[in-house]
Amino acid sequence: MAVLYHNPRCSKSRQALKLCQDSKIDVEIHLYLDEPLSYETLLSLIERLDGESKMAIRFKDKKFKLADSSELDVEDNSSIALFLSKNGHLMERPWLDVGTATAIGRPVENLLRYL
């Protein structure tokens, strides 16, 4: 079963949810702001990401400037996972996990090949 890491306040995430609901695969919805992801889960998502690891972080979010990113190395998957485990609200969304791979829906069409 696929998992969509979802933020219902995000329009792209809502679009991704609609795509998932219209698809033929079973998708579990994980509200990551309500149930934060562990370092291990984040590292696994990042290591299977279809794209650059640094795509996982919302750098343009105003809250990124307020976060302690002094130890963040955007070229290191472990560093990104650790940063996001402490700053889950800065995780890019929507994020789809289909088991063998993960994809970030920016744009949401990135998810179509997995649905």
Image (cartoon, rainbow, N blue to C red):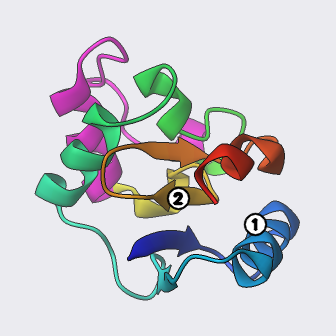
Q: Is residue 65 above or below residue 95?
A: above
SS for dot 2: strand
60 vs 18, nearest the viewer: 18
Residue 8 image position (x, y, % from top left): 72, 83
Q: Is residue 65 magenta?
A: yes
Residue 100 image position (x, y, % from top left): 31, 46
Left or right for 115, reference 89: right
Residue 94: quadrant of the picture: bottom right
Residue situated furthest top in the rendering: 75
Q: Which residue is mark 2?
A: 96
What's the residue type where badge 1 is placed? Ala
Q: Are marks 2 and 1 in contact (CB under 8 Å)?
A: yes
What's the residue type where badge 2 is placed? Leu
Residue 64: quadrant of the picture: top right
Q: Quadrant of the N terminus?
A: bottom left
Q: Residue at x 45, y 76 (%)?
A: 32
Label placed on residue 16: 1
100 vs 55, nearest the viewer: 100
Which residues lie in the magenta part? 64-86
Residue situated furthest left in the rendering: 40
Left or right for 93, reference 75: right
Q: Residue at x 48, y 19 (%)?
A: 52
